[in-house]
Image (cartoon, rainbow, N blue to C red):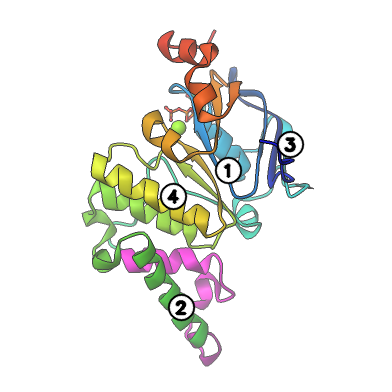
Amino acid sequence: MDEPSPKPILEIRNITKNFGGLTALNDVSFDLHPGEILGVIGPNGAGKTTLFDVITGRYRPSGGKVFHKGEDITGLKPHQIVQKGISRSFQLEVLFKNLSVFKHLVMSRHLHTQVGFWGSFFRTPGNRKEEEATEAEALELMRFVGLEVQGDRLGGNLSHGYQKSLGIAMALGPAPEILLLDEPLSALSPKRVTDILDLIRAIRDKGVTVMVIEHNMGALFRICDRVVVLSVGEKIAEGLPEEIKHNQRVIEAYLGGAVRA
Ligand SMILES: Nc1ncnc2c1ncn2[C@@H]1O[C@H](COP(=O)(O)OP(=O)(O)OP(=O)(O)O)[C@@H](O)[C@H]1O
Ligand SMILES: [Mg+2]
């Protein structure tokens, strides 16, 4: 690329995370550029989910910093990170068994609106209007991710594929600028994989910057602009999908079944 890179929207700087004696992340640094889809790969236990946990405020890093548009956001609480416009989905989506798809989405929208979660229980005239807007947006989200027919289904009755779509939709609820997806394709049929890849592209085309953790590299490489590779807590490579496919260290990490010392 000849064009100068735009200013990063997120800077991961020397992030280390220890759990007791285990180093889940060791001095990891890279940038996320606005508008890109960045893939994050690596063998099981590489530290990928921990990286998302650190960025989104679930864990405070043992060392290093995260900058959002130049501002140090290290150690902020998860809700403060959401307010900065950074949202995530989870590797294993936790849904409410007895709550409908629609209600899940209304709830996730409340993370974004002025009404707030408690305000929605007291339907005063002031916030009734806002509530209607939230419901309209929840419907729109349902359509956007292909769940429009599933609106009344309860969380506990959803197929795995629809659970994954709902997880992405809930992460979109707060209208993020940066979306972090943790294994959005896991255990999906080939048809559903294609649907979710299309959805991720559509999300990016709406101006959202996306970071995707995924084990399905063949699928991931169809949509991502760049790739960061973690292995045993360390960043071992970063580059274009074509480069990463042929990177010797990456091949060895996968074939050799990288293990912790
Ligand atoms: N809360 C925790 N307490 C102790 N160890 C943890 C904790 N969370 C993660 N780990 C350990 O940190 C390492 C990295 O885990 P992480 O979940 O980030 O890996 P991953 O790359 O997401 O793996 P996978 O592809 O299997 O999801 C693993 O050895 C894991 O057991
Ligand atoms: Mg993980």
Q: Secondary structure at mark 1?
A: loop
Give whichever of discs 1 and 3 has the lower sequence position.
1
Badge 3 vs badge 2, beta-carbon distance below 8 Å: no
Dot 4 amino acid type? Ile
> Residue at (33%, 37%) from the top-left corner?
186
Mark 3 packing: few (<14 Cα in 10 Å), some, or many (20+)?
A: many
Dot 2 amino acid type? Phe
**Disc number for residue 200:** 4
- Mark 1 or 3, which is nearer the eye? 3
Q: CA distance from mark 1 to mark 4?
A: 24 Å
Query: Mark 3 — residue?
Result: 65
Name the spot of residue 2 as percent of width and height, x first: 70, 37
Q: Quadrant of residue 24?
A: top right
Is residue 56 within the magenta segment?
no
Q: Nearer the viewer, residue 42 or 8?
A: 8
Q: Which residues are magenta?
A: 101-128
Q: CA distance from mark 4 to mark 3?
A: 27 Å
Question: Main structural element of the magenta stretch: helix, strand or loop?
Answer: helix
Badge 1 vs badge 2, beta-carbon distance below 8 Å: no
Mark 1 packing: few (<14 Cα in 10 Å), some, or many (20+)?
A: some
Q: CA distance from mark 1 to mark 3?
A: 14 Å
Q: Is residue 240 above or below residue 35?
A: above
Q: Quadrant of residue 183?
A: top left
> Residue at (72%, 47%) from the top-left corner?
73
Give whichever of discs 4 and 2 has the lower sequence position.
2
Query: Mark 2 — residue?
Result: 121
Q: Is residue 113 above or below residue 10?
A: below
> Residue at (27%, 48%) from the top-left corner?
161
Q: Residue furthest bottom?
A: 125
- Mark 1 or 2, which is nearer the eye? 1
Query: Mark 1 — residue?
Result: 58
Q: Quadrant of the C terminus?
A: top right
